[in-house]
Image (spheres, rainbow, N blue to C red):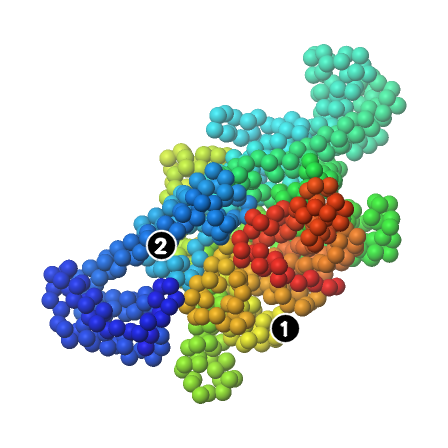
Amino acid sequence: MFVIKRDGTKVPFNKEKIINAIEKAGIAAGKDIPKEFSVTAASKILNLSSDTEVESIQDMVEKELMQEYPEVAKKYILYRDMRNVERHKRTHIKKAFDGIVTVEKNNINKENANMAGDTPSGQMMTFASETTKDYTHKYLLNQEYSRAHMSGDIHIHDLDYYPTKTSTCVQYDLKKLFDNGFSSKHGKIREPKSISTYAVLATIIFQTNQNEQHGGQAIPAFDFFMAPGVLKSFRRHFRYRALTFLEFDYIEEKSKEVKLIVNSLVTTIDVDDKTKEKLASELNLPLKTVNRLVTIAYNDTKNETHQAMEGFIHNLNTMHSRGGNQVVFSSINYGTDTSPEGRMVAFELLNSTEEGLGDSETPIFPIQILKIKEGITYSEKDFKLACQNWDKAIKGKLEFETPNFDLFIRSCEVSSKRLFPNFVFLDAPFNHNEKWDINDPDRYKYEIATMGCRTRVFENVNGEKTSVGRGNISFTSINMPRLAIRAKLDAERELNGASENEIQKLAIEKFYDRVKNMSLFVGKQLADRFSFQKTALARQFPFMMSNGIWNGGETLGLNEEVGDALSSGTLGIGFIGGHNAMMALFGKGHGSDDTAYETLYNAVKIIKDTAEELSKKHKLNFSALATPAEGLSGRFTKIDKQVFGEITGVNDRDYYINSFHVDVKEDISAIEKIKKEAPFHELTRGGHITYIELDGEAKKNVLAIMKLVKEMHEAGIGYGSINHPVDRCKECGYKGIVQDNCPVCGSTNISKTRRITGYLTGDLDNWNSYKQKEEEDRVKHGM
C-alpha cells in the first residue's frame, strides 16, 4: 500500500508513524494507550486494498481513537489542525504573497479578469483576499467544509468575502429608488427630473452598491425604469421651446403656469392630434406652431436620450468601484416596454453601444440582455416577413405586427458588431409567470431577468415570484469529474474481472449516489453559511438595506440583524465539468454519445431535485446552478491531476469544461449544440447560459444571428449568447478579424475582445492561464 501525500506524490506506508502519533497523542492527554491498540489501528490501515490519501488515513486514526479514547482523539485533532495551519502558512500564503509582491503573471493575480491585479489597489485587494480566505478556513468554516474545499471536492465561492456576511448579487427596483429618492452616505438624493439624471443616478446606484456585495448587480427592466425620464425631458424641452415662442423665455411665474399645462396634457412623447389642439388652446398658440414645437421637442429629447445612454455606457466602463481598478460588474435587461419612451431608451442605448467608446472600443459593461417575448419582441410571422424582405427589414422600412420586433432586429445587428445584447427567453416554460399580463403597466415584475454571467433568480418560497429586489445569497460548486473518476475506480475495484458493461452500470449507480450525497453536503454548507450571513447588522450594508434594494431591508433598524430580509434570495448548488465527468465514465462526451448524455442529464436532475427537497426542508430558495467557472475551471483540474494522475480526455487539459456545456473542442453544429444544451436550462434554475461560437465577421451576416436566436427560442433555451471575434487595431483603429498583424498598418498592438464566463474582456492577457487555453481551444459552430 502507498500513501498519497498532499503534493500528490506516493510513498510506502510506514505503520510506525501511526503508532508514534497515537502514543504522542496519549501522552499529551495524560492517557496511557496500550501498544496493542496502536498496532491494531495501524494494521487496519495497512490492510487497505488501495493507495490512500494522507488526510483519509488521519481521518481513520481519528475514528479509531474516538471509539476507545475520545479525550485522546481531541488532542490528536488539535495537533493535526495545528500542523495543517503551520504547513499552510509555510506554503500557500508565503508563495501567494511573494507572487503579489513581484507582480508575477500567475493565476492568483489574474483570478478575476475584471481586476488589474498588478496595480497598487489590485495588490492590496489580492493581499486582503488571500489573507481573509486563510482566516475563514481557520476560524469560521466548519472543518468538514474547509477540508472538502481544500481537497477539491467542492469550491466555496467568494471565501474572501465570507467574514463580511454579504451576499453575491441583486437586481434593482429602480422605480422605487427613483420615485422615492434614495439615501447615500452624505444625504438624500431627490427624484430625478430628466433622462440625463436618470442615467447618471443609475450608474451611481450601481457603483455604490458594488461595495456592499461581492458579485454583480443588474437592472431587470431598464427600459421601463428609464422611460419616465424620457417623458420628463420631453415635457421640459417642449415647455422651454413654448416659452420662447410666447416671448416669456424663462420667467418663473409663466414657466410654472406652462409647466402645469404641459404636465397635465402631455402623457407621452408620441403626442396625438387631440392633445396638440388642447395645447394650442391652453397656451394660446397656433396649432401649426404647436406641431412644430412637438417635433423640435421630440428631436431634443432623442438627442438628450442618446447622450444619456452614451454617458451611462461610458461611466460604467470608467468608474472604478472596488480595489484593483475594477469597473462595476453591471447588467441590464430590456426589450418588453412598448411605450414610445421605453423604445426610445432601448434604441438609443443600442445606437450608443454600436458607436462604442471614445476610440470606438467595444463597451465591456453593462452586459446587455434583450428579453425575447412572443407578441412583443418576436413572432414567427414577423420573422418570415423579415427574412423575405431583408433589405427593407434591416433599414427599418417594414411594418411588423409585433410592437418591438424592430428592436429585436436592431439588437441582433448591434450584437453582430459588439457581442451584446445577449438574449433571455421569457417564453421558455420555466421562465413563465402566471401573473404576467400584457396590459399590466408593471408587467416587468413578472418577467424573468438575469445577471450577465448567468445567475437566475425567479422562483421564491418566501414571497413573490420575481427577479426584482432579489439576488443570489451565495453558491458552492461540486467537482463533478472527481465524483465520476471515483465512481469508476470503485466499480472497477468491486467488480474486478467483470465485463465492461457490468462495471459501467455499477459506476453510473455509484456516480448518481455521489452526486446526491455531495448535493446534500453542499446544501448543508450553504444553509450554515446563510445562518451566518443573516446575523449581519443592517448598518453593515447602509445603502443596500436602508434603501430597500433587497426587498424588506428598508424596514430594519441600523442595529437589527438582516435576518429574513435575505431569505428571498437564492442559494446555488453549482457544478462544473459535466463533459469531463462523462469522459471519466464512458471515454466519450455527452455531445456525441447518447448514454453519456442521458447520464449527465440524470445527474444534473439529481442536483435540481435535491435543491427542491432542501427548499422545502429549510424554506429557503436552493437551486441548481450551471457555475460560471473562471479560476475554478483550472483549480479543480490541477488538484485532480495531483490526486489521480493525468487521465486522457478527463483532466489532461488545463481546465474543466463549464457546467453542462458540450466540449469546447466538439465538432458540432450550432443548431445541434442548442438542442443538446437546452434541456439542461430547465434543470439549472439558479442560472445557465448557452454559447454559440460563430466564425468570420458576424456583422456581415446579421440574419445568421437572428436565426440562431430563433433556434434558441424554439428549443427552450433560457438564456443564450453568440460569440464571434471582435478585434481592433489600437494603432490605426481598424476593426475586423485580425490574426497577428493589422492588415492595414501591420501593428501587433491588437485588442481582442472575447467573452470569458458571461462578460467581455478587451485583452486576453488579463485572463488566467486556464481560460486562455480554453479560449484557444474553442471551435466554431457552423449553421
Classify mark 2: helix, strand or loop: helix
Q: Which residue is drawn at 58% across and 74% down?
A: 588
Query: Label 2 sits on what residue type?
Result: Thr
What percent of the width, then of the height, locates residue 358? 69, 36
x%, y% of residue 76? 22, 61
Name above or below for residue 634 compared with residue 316. Answer: below
Viewer-proximal residue among 354 and 518: 354
Q: How far apart are marks 1 and 2 (CA)?
A: 42 Å
Q: Residues within 10 Å of mark 1 (few under 14, many from 20)?
A: some
Q: How many neighbours does mark 2 have within 10 angstroms: few (below 14), some (14-19), or many (20 or more)?
A: few
The label on residue 592 is: 1
Q: Is residue 653 left or right of residue 288?
A: left
- Quarter of the image with the N terminus is bottom left
For residue 243, above or below residue 722: above
Asked whether disc 1 touches disc 2, contact meaning CB atoms under 8 Å apart, the reply is no
Labelled disc at residue 242: none
| Residue at the spot 56% in from the left edge and 68% down from the top edge | 579
- Residue 524 placement, left or right of 215: left
Q: Where is residue 698 in the image (x, y as percent from the top left)?
A: 75, 53
Amino acid residing under circle 1 = Ser
| Sooner in the amino-acid sequence: mark 1 or mark 2 | 2
From the image, tell me which residue sits under label 2.
Answer: 91
Q: Is label 1 in a helix, a strand or a loop?
A: loop
